[in-house]
Image (cartoon, rainbow, N blue to C red):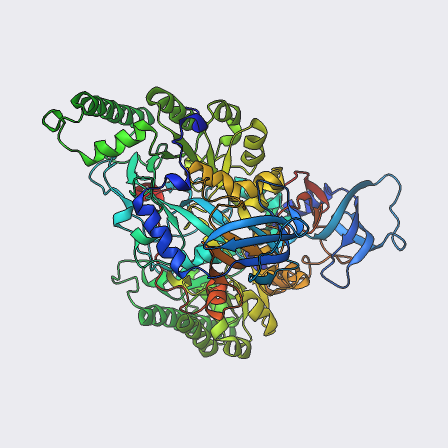
């Protein structure tokens, strides 16, 4: 997934510089949920140079002298919002800063989230104060292919400070969102079949582009095709290097997505999936992960048949599942993935499952579990502190640590 | 200006023909024998919670409530054991858009003559969602895309084939409701709608002056038909507003917009409930000093539009500490009626007391609708409207088990159809129109 050749070297320098400012910090928790094993009662996490250096019970891990110490009733890995548009949209819904969706054409994979993401957008801080340390943001649903997504930490003054994956996935939509996106004219689909046809045609173009590029690399006599930014990205989708994140909610649209994934052997991740409970066997057989719609999403339009229990059914079926805040156009401007996960707890999802869906399971689906998603030695020093059950309304987030930096002490 | 001193005195005994007829019709299908709910935690709101409490209902009314030691269960009563569960009064949502309510159209910004009554679809799945959320009384209104979008309606979630069957009635038998108004960003658009806040206030002021003059003409006519002004349905509704018989329910968010409402209220003497009030935390003392109640919604994040920039959960404790009256609302579709209880949880998260939060789900809303003589608490003589919960109302783990309206079980989590409504699923929420008032046109 990591498209390393797209990261400018200055960016890497920035990340290295930031890490140097990381504090050494110890966090004591009455209960530490590591998302990598049993809960640790009266535990300690030591973070050094931005990375987790030790975790265990207070009997096993001692707090070094002189280190900053924070205390909390509950400590979890920094939370991960597996899909949002925070940072891509201004929170006051003004016309000039809603950069999650470009309406000029149906298929624009060349649009890079990194060229629009605003690390100082107030909602980034809003999420951070709840213990959300990593977000998968970028171009949202609403066009057949709306553009790229990125993965960022919820800290830093610039995208260079924040970014983990500058080009994480390509976002696509199958269903009413895509059908209604344009005017039904030459470049925008007017029916579901047309959405699929346009997407197929573009993937075929990318296949051809990739083949010609490869052929030219093998044979000096052959000319590579003219450089095409759109094709560069879709060639990554065709090769499987770049996941295609497909928003599909109705059962027939989900099936269309699965068909296309199989036809092109694409690394596909389903987004939304409001009617996934009708297709558990099919989704599982396809080996596709699901970033399920927010539990409190409104039951309207393509999501009119959504259920509070879908998350429980996906998890029960053994389908890799992560939670998200999604996209909102009005009030609330963003949901909070911690609150969304909480709702599933009253609808069949266990505490551990809900926590996994906003930590380690989300990290695996996003391909970043080598760095984040659990409290394990060597991973990024991202921690969330709470004064009680993190999911309970009446508890509070009381601290957030990212890369070893105590970035929030707000009680929220 | 002072709500309680202005409110018309009403009691069940004083209800005139129309209402009594509706009540007696209901009584016919109500249970024949008393029902006693025993073993659970009873939270009456007007009294301290009782563990191992008893609630007894008969003929659609509450006849007794208290501890098992104090309340005698009548002979022949059906006894329902609710051990481990919690009984609270039926929830009162003071601001909702379920049932496709529509008021004024695009022809003008002030349309007091438009009645939500004439638009409501009682078969909309929103009503079933509301019952699944423990709601028993809902204030349904049109949107905030007008300075005055029309007459709202208070409904009881009893069974009913038509809006008139579920509408609350006033003492004279007429349909009970308020007057929806709005200021701030949502009513602003091209003429004849206002383009600025000052113009918004000027248009409203002019209309109320016209209503004062109309009222004076009616008074001067002294029931002499020849001297009466021509009938004007909008003016008649505004006369009810000026008389204090019809409460203004006012969408308002920004602190200065709140103060504008308070000025207009003082100037014309109408009774008003402030709705949404994103910046209540900035003017909580002023609101409390004006003795004006607040119908509050707590939102997951700030923004979405300019006037909601500073929305904050801390409005809930700020208003409580200032001494203001607070109810909660769903603003359904903004938040789902099935998640209404969440408001109390979020209020407590921000520092509101659990007692005040429960009151805000129930009795405070009833008071804001002038219905507290009938609903809002578990007291003998009040309607048998209550909710059986699996746990405390402020917990995310708590689910509504049963919703009772006038002694009828209207939602039961053990009924597969009801459970489907509570949870969602394929085709279960049909027909459903989530009234979507996006943006400037019909914003909230």
Q: In which quarter of the image is residue B230?
A: top left
Q: In this view, does B317 lie above or below B394?
A: above
Residue B444 image offset from top left, x and y in percent? 38, 42
Asked whether residue B194 appears in the rendered view, the answer is no
Q: In this view, does B170 lie above or below B129?
A: above
Q: Nearer the viewer, residue B347 or B77?
A: B77
The quadrant of the image that shows the N terminus of chain B is: top left
Asked whether residue B271 appears in the rendered view, the answer is yes
Q: Quadrant of residue B261?
A: top left
Horizontal side of residue B148 vs B6, given as left or right: left
Q: In this view, does A341 lie above or below A402?
A: below
Q: Nearer the viewer, residue A211 or A119?
A: A119
Please count the marks in the image.
0
Residue A249 image offset from top left, x and y in percent? 43, 66
Residue B96 image offset from top left, x and y in percent? 40, 47
Residue B297 image offset from top left, x and y in percent? 48, 41
Q: Which of A58 and A1 is in front in this view?
A: A58
Horizontal side of residue B340 vs B140, given as left or right: right
Q: In this view, does B193 lie above or below B2?
A: below
Looking at this rendering, what residue extends furthest in the front direction?
A: B75
């Amino acid at each position: 997934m990591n498209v390393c050749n797209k990261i400018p070297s200055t960016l890497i320098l920035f990340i290295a510089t930031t890490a140097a400012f990381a504090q050494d910090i110890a966090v004591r928790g009455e209960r530490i949920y590591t998302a990598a094993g049993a809960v640790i009662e009266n535990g300690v996490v030591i973070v050094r140079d931005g990375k987790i250096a030790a975790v265990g019970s207070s009997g096993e891990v001692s707090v070094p002298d002189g280190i900053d110490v924070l205390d909390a009733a509950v400590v979890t890995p920094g939370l991960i919002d597996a899909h949002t548009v925070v940072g891509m949209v201004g929170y006051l819904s003004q016309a000039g800063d809603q950069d999650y969706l470009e309406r000029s054409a149906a298929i624009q994979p060349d649009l890079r989230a990194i060229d629009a993401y605003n690390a100082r957008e107030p909602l980034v801080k809003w999420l951070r104060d709840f213990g959300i340390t990593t977000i998968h943001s970028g171009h949202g649903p609403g066009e057949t292919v709306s553009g790229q997504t990125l993965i960022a930490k919820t800290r830093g003054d610039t995208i260079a400070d924040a970014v983990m994956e500058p080009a994480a996935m390509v976002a696509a939509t199958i269903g009413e969102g895509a059908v209604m996106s344009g005017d039904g004219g030459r470049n925008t689909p007017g029916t579901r079949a047309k959405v699929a046809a346009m997407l197929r045609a573009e993937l075929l173009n990318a296949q051809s582009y990739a083949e010609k590029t490869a052929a030219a690399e093998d044979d000096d006599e052959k000319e590579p095709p003219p450089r095409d930014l759109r094709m560069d990205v879709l060639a990554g989708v065709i090769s499987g290097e770049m996941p295609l994140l497909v928003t599909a909610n109705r059962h027939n649209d989900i099936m269309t997505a699965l068909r296309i994934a199989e036809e092109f052997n694409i690394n596909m991740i389903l987004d939304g999936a409001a009617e996934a409970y009708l297709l558990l066997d099919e989704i599982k057989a396809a080996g596709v992960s699901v970033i399920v719609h927010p539990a409190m999403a409104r039951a309207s339009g393509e999501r009119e048949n959504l259920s509070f229990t879908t998350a429980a059914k996906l998890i029960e079926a053994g389908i890799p599942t992560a939670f998200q805040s999604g996209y909102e156009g009005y009030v609330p401007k963003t949901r909070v993935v911690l609150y969304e996960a909480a709702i599933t707890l009253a609808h069949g999802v266990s505490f551990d499952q809900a926590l996994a869906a906003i930590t380690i399971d989300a990290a695996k689906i996003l391909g970043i579990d080598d760095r984040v998603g659990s409290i394990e030695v060597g991973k990024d020093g991202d921690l969330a502190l709470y004064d009680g059950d993190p999911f309970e309304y009446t508890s509070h987030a009381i601290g957030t640590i990212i890369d070893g930096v105590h970035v929030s002490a707000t009680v929220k | 200006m002072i709500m309680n001193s202005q409110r018309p005195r009403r009691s069940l005994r004083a209800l005139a023909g129309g209402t009594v007829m509706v009540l007696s019709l209901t009584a016919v299908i109500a249970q024949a024998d008393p029902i006693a709910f025993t073993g659970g935690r009873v939270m009456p709101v007007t009294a301290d919670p009782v563990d191992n409490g008893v609630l007894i209902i008969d003929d659609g009314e509450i006849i007794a409530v208290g501890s098992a030691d104090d309340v005698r269960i009548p002979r022949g009563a059906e006894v329902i054991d609710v051990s481990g569960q919690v009984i609270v009064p039926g929830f009162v949502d003071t601001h909702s858009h379920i049932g496709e309510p529509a008021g004024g159209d695009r022809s003008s910004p002030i349309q007091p003559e438009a009645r939500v009554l004439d638009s409501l679809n009682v078969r909309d799945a929103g009503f079933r969602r509301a019952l699944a959320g423990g709601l028993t009384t809902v204030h349904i209104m049109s949107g905030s895309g007008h300075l005055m979008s029309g007459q709202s309606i208070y409904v009881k979630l009893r069974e009913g084939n038509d809006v008139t069957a579920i509408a609350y009635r006033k003492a004279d038998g007429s349909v009970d409701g308020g007057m929806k108004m709005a200021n701030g960003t949502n009513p602003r658009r091209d003429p004849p709608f206002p383009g600025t806040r000052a113009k918004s206030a000027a248009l409203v002021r002019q209309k109320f002056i016209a209503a004062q003059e109309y009222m004076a003409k009616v008074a001067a006519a002294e029931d002499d038909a020849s001297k009466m002004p021509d009938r004007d349905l909008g003016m008649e509704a505004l006369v009810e507003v000026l008389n204090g018989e019809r409460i203004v329910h006012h969408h308002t968010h920004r602190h200065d917009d709140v103060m504008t409402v308070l000025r207009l209220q003082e100037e014309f003497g109408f009774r008003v409930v402030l709705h949404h009030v994103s910046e209540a935390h900035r003017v909580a003392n002023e609101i409390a000093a004006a003795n004006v109640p607040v119908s509050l919604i707590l939102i997951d994040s700030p923004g979405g539009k300019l006037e909601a920039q500073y929305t904050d959960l801390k409005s809930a404790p700020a208003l409580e500490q200032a001494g203001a009256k607070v109810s909660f609302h769903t603003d359904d579709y903004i938040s789902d009626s099935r998640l209404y209880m969440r408001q109390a949880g979020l209020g407590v998260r921000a520092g509101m007391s659990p007692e005040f939060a429960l009151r805000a789900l129930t009795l405070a809303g009833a008071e804001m609708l002038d219905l507290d003589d009938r609903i809002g608490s578990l007291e003998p003589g009040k309607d048998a409207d209550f909710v059986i919960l699996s746990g405390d109302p402020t917990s995310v783990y708590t689910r509504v088990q049963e919703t009772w309206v006038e002694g009828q079980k209207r939602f039961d989590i053990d009924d597969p159809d009801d459970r489907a409504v509570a949870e969602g699923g394929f085709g279960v929420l049909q027909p459903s129109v989530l009234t979507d008032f996006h943006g400037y046109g019909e914003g909230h």
